[in-house]
Structures are given as structure tokens and as C-alpha cells.
């Protein structure tokens, strides 16, 4: 390995960066460079080379490529980076004590290239797009190689791999005080002609609200405003989910949590805390539990910013993870947090299995199949029925799930019962205020 490449990789491994790489063939040599230097486990969480069309679609989470004009494009590189970022969040540190600096160093990188085939002259340019996605920032690199340069496929692959390494290095040096500011640029410069280097473009799109993770109100206001993205010329969908840890933003569009308790938490009480703790304890060591507030309700609309902040303030204790979503339906929540176990009461689980709420039997089956495809399931706790005041055990729901051939999606949370409710607490507080 060239000394300059090794020095770059050593700096990356010494940084706080934890990354997932999605590299569609061109640029894959960078993976070998990363893994050839000790301490790669400090940096690399996962890497994929989705070379075939089918693999690329799976990585992007798409069923078809009808809207993909070209796989070698800025848009695909950024989509790969976004998918890699979400994976990096999910498979990064599960520590509830993750800091804002840890969150900013979580990186997803996507690369897509069109390189020489040597025996056939390509009609289009030989080019490479690399995108790096972090909390509140997307940086995209574009490099075009001269077709008449005489480079072999091996040579062009080396150029593309250097661009991949540069993109990762630029993220890494943000957390390394003495990192050489020009090393990443020089890494690419030394294998390009003067014209090729001059035409390398770097574009950074930074959202200051998300980047300033400690200002929770600014973050939420920015997120709520993205509901209007359809009229603002935006080309990417607004994130469905925000993750806060101790009141500080730690992820956008993804979460580390794999056990999720959804509710209004108006107010949060010990029953909620005990339920999430009991559910998390059923999972393997390292599982991370989180509370989730859906800010949008089909009947009541979207909560005001003041109300959202009031509820979010309840989760400001260090290490406490709270998610905000715009997803009133559980099938949508599973898209936002794939692989998670959702903790629900028996009454909620019963509604999830009732075709009346889904609209039809066919709609319910489709919803359950999508939840299954998203690798999610439900932990069911017994609960007192609000109307009859009778305790409904989780076993009653499991029988209904089996009848719908959905027994694999529901499991009982054994020996758990807390009858207190937020409604009763609010009513008691109101009645006390009248005295």
C-alpha cells in the first residue's frame, strides 16, 4: 500500500467516524485499503457492493427502478448514502449515552461509477459520484475521467477508490485535531490530469437546524416545516423519524432503538417506564429501548410545536431515548424503524388485528405482510379495557393473531400489569385543580 494511502486510512481509523459503505462496483478497492490497516473495526460497521441491478434496488429499498434515469448519477449516489446512513445508525453504538459528537460522526457513504470496459467504447462519460451522508449534511463528489487517457479498468478503479477514500477522510478529519486539511485533495490530485482535477466538483448541502443537534426546538420546527416540501421543489422525502437522546438530536431518518414503546405520554408515568424496561429485558443484552411520540393523528391533526416540546422535555434525562414520528399507523412506524419490536397494550394489539380498522381483510393482510417484511413484531402487555374496566390479558390477543396467521408477529409480555393511565393522571390533576 502506498504510504500516502496508508496515512489517510490511519487518520480515518483514529477518528470518531463509524461508517457504512454502499459501493456499486467502482471504488470497491477502498474497502481493501480500509481493512488492510489495523483498527478498521473502529471505523467500518458494514460494507456492501450491490453490483447487480437487483441488489442495488434492494439496498435502496425500492421495488422497481422506474424512476431511476441512470444508476451512475448524483441522485443514486445520494440515495445509496442515505440508505447507508440509516444502516449506520441502526448498527452503530447502541449505547443510550451516545453523545452529539458521536451522532455527527455517524456516516453513510454511497458510490456509483461508470468506468471503462476496455474492449468496448462507452457512449457516455467515464465518471464517478460519491456521496457522504451525516447528521444534517450531504456532501457529494463528482469526478469525470478522460476517455482518451489510455487508463485501464484497473487504473480507473484506482481513481474512483481514491475519491471514495477522500470522501470518508473529509468526514474523519472533522474529529481529528491535527489532520492534514489537504491530504484528501492531494490523494485524488496525484492520479488525475490537470483538467480532470479542475473539473472535480464538491457540493455540500447542510441543514443548520439538524447540524446544531443541541437546539431541539429548532430541529423540530425544521422537521415540521418539511411537511410542505412538496411545494418547495424538494427532491427528497422528509425524514419520517427523529431520534433524541437526553433531549439532544442523535439521528435523523433512522434510530438505534430496537424496542419501541409508542404513546402520547401526556404525561409520562412510571407505568410507561416499567413497561419499556420489562420489554427491553426480554431482548438480548445490548437492546436499546425508546419511547415514540407520533406527532400526527388522523383525527386530531398535528400537535403544536409548544405541545411537542412540552412532551419531549419529559425525556431529557441523560440516556433516555425518545423518537418523534409523523406516522400515525403502525405499518408506517415499521418503515421508520425496521427490525424493531413495538410494545403495545392488548387493546391496541386487538385493533391491529381487526379488519374494521384496516378497512378490509385484504388491507389488513397486506399491512401485516409489510410489517413482517420490515422485520418488526409486537410485544403485547395485558391492559385494562377503558370501557368495561376489565383486565384484558395478552393471551386473548395471541389467539386472534393465530387465527389471522400472524402468530409470528405477536408475543406476550409475561407477568406484567400496571393499571395506571395518562388519562387518569390528567383527570386527577384537573379534579385536584377544581378543589
Image (spheres, rainbow, N blue to C red):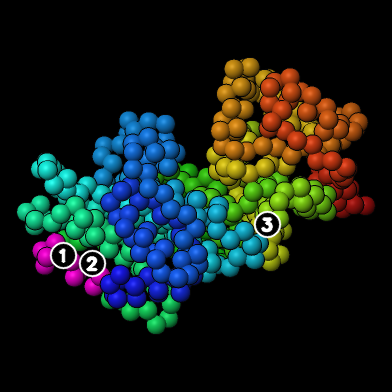
In this picture, which residue range is highlighted in magenta? 186-198
User: Of helix, strand and loop, which one carries label 1?
Assistant: loop
Point out the residue furthest to the right here: 435
Residue drawn at point x = 79 percent, y = 33 percent: 346
Residue 138, quarter of picture: bottom left
- Which one is earlier in the sequence, the residue at label 3 or at label 2? 2
Label 1 crowd (10 A; few <14 / some 14-19 / many >=20):
some
Pointer 1 residue: 192
CA gap between label 1 and label 3 equals: 46 Å
Q: Nearer the viewer, residue 75 or 405?
A: 405
Alpha-carbon span between mark 3 and mark 2? 40 Å
Image-based side of 258 in relation to 103, left or right: right
**Numbered disc 2: secondary structure:** helix
Q: Residue 321 placed where, x, y %? A: 66, 57
What label sits on residue 287 in the rendered view? none
Residue 138 belongs to magenta span: no
**Is residue 195 highlighted in magenta?**
yes
> In this rendering, is residue 266 above or below 8?
above
**Secondary structure of the residue carrying numbered label 3:** loop
In the depicted structure, whether residue 341 falls above or below residue 165: above
Q: Residues within 10 Å of mark 2 (few under 14, many from 20)?
A: many
Real-space Cα distance between discs 1 and 2? Answer: 7 Å
Residue 322 image point, x, y percent = 65, 54
25 sits left or right of 388 in the view? left
Q: How far from the left and from the top, in percent, is residue 393?
A: 86, 32
Residue tagged 3: 286
Mark 1 and mark 3 in contact? Answer it, CB < 8 Å: no
Residue furthest left in the image = 148
The image quadrant where one finds the N terminus is bottom left
- Labelled disc at residue 188: 2
Picture residue at 25% right of the left edge, 70% below the top: 187
- The secondary structure making up most of the magenta span is helix
Amino acid at each position: 500500500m502506498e504510504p500516502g494511502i496508508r496515512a489517510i486510512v490511519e487518520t480515518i481509523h483514529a477518528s470518531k467516524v463509524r461508517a457504512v459503505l454502499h459501493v456499486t462496483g467502482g471504488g470497491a478497492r477502498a474497502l481493501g485499503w480500509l481493512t488492510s490497516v489495523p483498527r478498521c473495526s473502529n471505523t467500518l460497521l458494514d460494507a456492501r457492493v450491490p453490483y447487480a441491478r437487483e441488489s442495488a434496488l434492494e439496498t435502496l429499498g425500492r421495488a422497481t427502478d422506474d424512476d431511476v434515469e441512470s444508476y451512475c448519477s448524483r441522485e443514486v449516489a445520494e440515495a445509496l448514502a442515505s440508505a447507508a446512513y440509516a444502516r449506520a445508525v441502526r448498527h452503530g453504538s447502541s449505547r443510550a449515552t451516545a453523545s452529539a459528537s458521536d451522532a455527527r460522526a455517524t456516516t453513510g457513504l454511497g458510490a456509483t461509477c461508470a468506468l471503462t470496459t476496455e474492449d468496448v467504447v462507452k457512449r457516455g462519460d467515464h465518471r464517478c459520484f460519491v456521496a457522504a451522508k451525516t447528521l444534517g449534511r450531504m456532501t457529494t463528489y463528482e469526478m469525470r475521467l478522460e476517455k482518451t487517457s489510455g487508463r485501464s479498468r484497473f487504473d480507473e478503479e484506482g481513481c474512483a477508490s481514491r475519491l471514495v477514500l477522500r470522501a470518508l477522510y473529509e468526514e474523519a478529519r472533522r474529529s481529528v485535531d491535527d489532520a492534514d486539511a489537504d491530504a484528501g485533495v492531494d490523494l485524488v490530485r496525484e492520479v488525475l490530469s490537470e483538467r480532470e482535477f479542475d473539473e472535480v466538483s464538491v457540493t455540500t448541502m447542510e441543514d443548520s437546524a439538524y447540524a446544531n443537534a443541541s437546539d431541539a426546538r429548532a430541529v423540530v420546527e425544521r422537521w415540521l416545516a418539511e411537511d410542505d416540501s412538496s411545494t418547495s421543489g424538494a427532491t427528497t422525502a422528509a425524514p419520517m423519524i427523529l431520534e433524541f437522546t437526553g433531549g439532544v438530536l442523535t439521528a435523523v431518518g433512522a434510530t438505534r432503538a430496537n424496542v419501541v414503546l409508542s404513546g402520547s405520554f401526556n404525561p409520562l408515568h412510571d407505568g410507561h417506564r416499567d413497561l419499556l424496561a420489562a420489554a427491553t429485558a426480554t431482548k438480548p443484552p445490548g437492546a436499546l429501548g425508546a419511547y415514540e411520540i407520533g406527532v400526527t393523528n388522523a383525527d386530531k391533526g398535528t400537535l403544536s410545536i409548544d405541545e411537542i416540546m412540552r412532551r419531549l422535555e419529559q425525556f431529557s434525562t441523560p440516556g433516555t431515548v425518545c423518537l418523534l414520528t409523523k406516522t400515525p399507523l403502525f405499518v408506517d412506524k415499521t418503515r421508520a424503524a425496521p427490525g424493531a419490536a413495538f410494545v403495545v397494550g392488548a387493546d391496541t394489539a386487538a385493533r391491529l388485528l381487526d379488519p374494521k380498522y384496516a378497512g378490509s381483510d385484504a388491507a389488513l393482510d397486506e399491512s401485516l405482510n409489510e410489517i413482517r417484511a420490515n422485520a418488526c413484531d409486537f410485544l403485547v402487555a395485558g391492559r385494562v379495557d377503558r370501557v368495561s374496566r376489565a383486565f384484558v390479558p395478552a393471551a386473548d390477543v395471541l389467539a386472534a393473531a393465530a387465527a389471522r396467521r400472524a402468530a409470528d408477529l405477536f408475543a406476550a409480555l409475561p407477568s406484567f400489569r400496571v393499571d395506571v393511565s395518562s388519562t387518569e393522571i390528567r383527570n386527577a390533576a384537573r379534579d385536584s385543580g377544581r378543589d
